[in-house]
Image (spheres, helix red, strand yellow):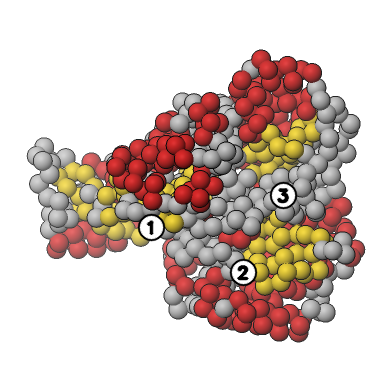
Amino acid sequence: MPDTHFYRYDDYDRTLVGERVEQFRDQVRRRIAGELTEEQFKPLRLTNGLYLQLHAYMLRIAIPYGTLSSRQLRKLADIARKYDRGYGHFTTRQNLQLNWIKLEDAPDALAALAEVDMHAMQTSGNCIRNVTADHYAGAAIDEIEDPRIWCEIVRQWSTLHPEFSFLPRKFKIAITGSPNDRAAVRVHDIGLRLWANEAGDVGFEVIVGGGLGRTPMIGKTLREFLPRDELLAYLEATLRVYNRYGRRDNLYKARIKILVHEIGAEKMREEVEAEYAAIKDGALKLPVETIEAIARQFAPPALPHRAAVVAEVEGLKLEDRDFALWLKSNVAPHRMAGYRIVTASLKPAGAPPGDASAVQMEGVADIADAYSQGEIRVSHEQNLVLPHVAVEDLPAVWRALGRLGFAEANVGKITDIIACPGLDYCALANARSIPVAQRISNHFAGLARQHDIGDLKIKISGCINACGHHHVGHIGILGVDKNGVELYQLSLGGDVDFGKTAIGAILGPAVTADKVVEAVDAMVHTYLDNRGDGERFVDTYRRIGAQPFKERVYAAV
Amino acid sequence: MAKNLSGDLSVASANRLVDGVVVFLDDAGQWTTRFERAAVARDKRGGEILLERARAEAFGVIDPFLVAVSEDDDGRIEPISLREKIRASGLTFDAIAAEAVRYA
């Protein structure tokens, strides 16, 4: 299946990535030969996405805007099998992490990635990181415009951008093309939301200074409406202001969110607009032809007409409860009648969230070829998405995903847990995340119960850096270390739905690892005992407040 | 019963350069992946000397450091911190296998 529905490298991209691989190969050779010290080498490996974790090197592979072709996913499986231990971890940044890469193999792994137009650049360091997007992009029924066109434009502008390669701190941009935010744009350094104004013109709401981590902040809108062709100039102006005024004296105060918080959104806007006025008619104003050329590469696949109502699907829905539940939770509307968007849950009961074996990756690639135009998306909720599945193919896709263990009908439910790698892998973590997620997942494994509980997002981080997005979980769980003991701080009420983005509030004292399941169970029972008609967990929390949850949790633990 | 929880006992550890694997310095001054073979320093001064030896043997490893350990009545040593226990023993859950189609 050719990669025809999203951007493919041109000669410039291929040359750049190829040269980078060979440059890194030489750097690795020099390091192993002792010609470079670790101090000299560390920044070089990090700029190629190679971290040193607890047990081994970890390669963080960029998946631009979370979009993969079947060919690319097969290559990731191949790399995982050949150079790692045969599995990978899909992350909240829509990337893939391989946890056991050998330094001596890393250049070959990067060369293999380059064969399918991929790399690991800018997945580390104080630069503009891989741009993330709505994982339903190009298929969503509520989409105004495919955000990946703009992600790709930003990718080209930001790749090895000399002015922004040494920012005060890392910088994350997310773009959504839908009013229903699925890309968490308000908790990124810059969030961009495409929308159409009253005149029918499409532009960006520019949201700046959001973020999670040690100091969670919801981004402020600097521009309500930015014409699309002015995007790069406005981004450049914003980054330039940040680069100039962002703090470099304190690692923990270096993100743009701190700058916006300290000087205020008004002052930030003034500074950005002044810079923008000086450069907006320069080289960064995007010619229509450039935009159109990139947009053409994201032209939707020519989906043939397929029936919107299919007797077999309706029949199976009545016969098989698991299929009916799967349709409810894992299948979303598509912009074209007769098609649906399917989420393959990488959260089967008791599994490490977001992990997939090489065989599973290859299996998903096969399903994508057979039923989804050869396309796959990675969601920031650590699942894989098949964006273009015909309604009549849903039973076959469900069965095929079931054979891979990826048909759990739990998307958006209590076991669809986001979890960072935590202390089992990560050099920064203070506590484990995955075993906690596994215990919760096993405890709530029954599908009927999960669907009765309804939408409930649990997000777990193993340290304050918040890779598991715990601040915006309906239930957030943060692992901390207190005198050598793992404790878990619980928070309630976080959310990233557009217009309702909220940072969770800490419930009370942290609990020990063996009490986390009881605590979550107590929260769930508090909700079930108090929920009103149609209320989700987080709605009930908002209505009744934290106290009833607090009383029950601390009585239980 | 642990004899020493104060952190005075220590071993030297690092990650191996070529593959990142966790290693420990043994009595012969070699880096080993086997924690139980690690040379044990029994007091603060011994720890300083062990770390100096580790740094002197650091060509094939990255950033040696001391790991506080405890010792039981049978002479078995164990890292005190959970982080170092995990470094010495590996993941605390079963990772999915390359050929696995289901998590078990």
SS of the residue at dot 2?
Answer: strand
Horizontal and vertical percent position of residue A273: 71, 80
Q: Residues within 10 Å of mark 1 (few under 14, many from 20)?
A: many
The amino acid sitting under disc 2 is Lys
Quadrant of res A34: bottom left
Q: Chain of mark 3?
A: A
Residue A285 in view, yes or no: yes
Residue at 56% across, 75% down: A260
Query: What's the distance in space between the residues labelled 1 and 2, CA to CA?
Result: 42 Å
Residue A468 in view, yes or no: no
Residue under circle 3?
A: A117
To the question of a shared chain for discs 3 and 1, the answer is: no
Q: Quadrant of the C terminus of chain A?
A: top left
Number of the label disc, if any, that sits on residue A11: none
Residue under circle 1?
A: B62
Residue at 89% across, 31% down: A305
Horizontal and vertical percent position of residue A292: 88, 59
Quadrant of res A250: bottom left
Contact (Cβ within 8 Å) of mark 2 with mark 3: no
Horizontal and vertical percent position of residue A391: 78, 28
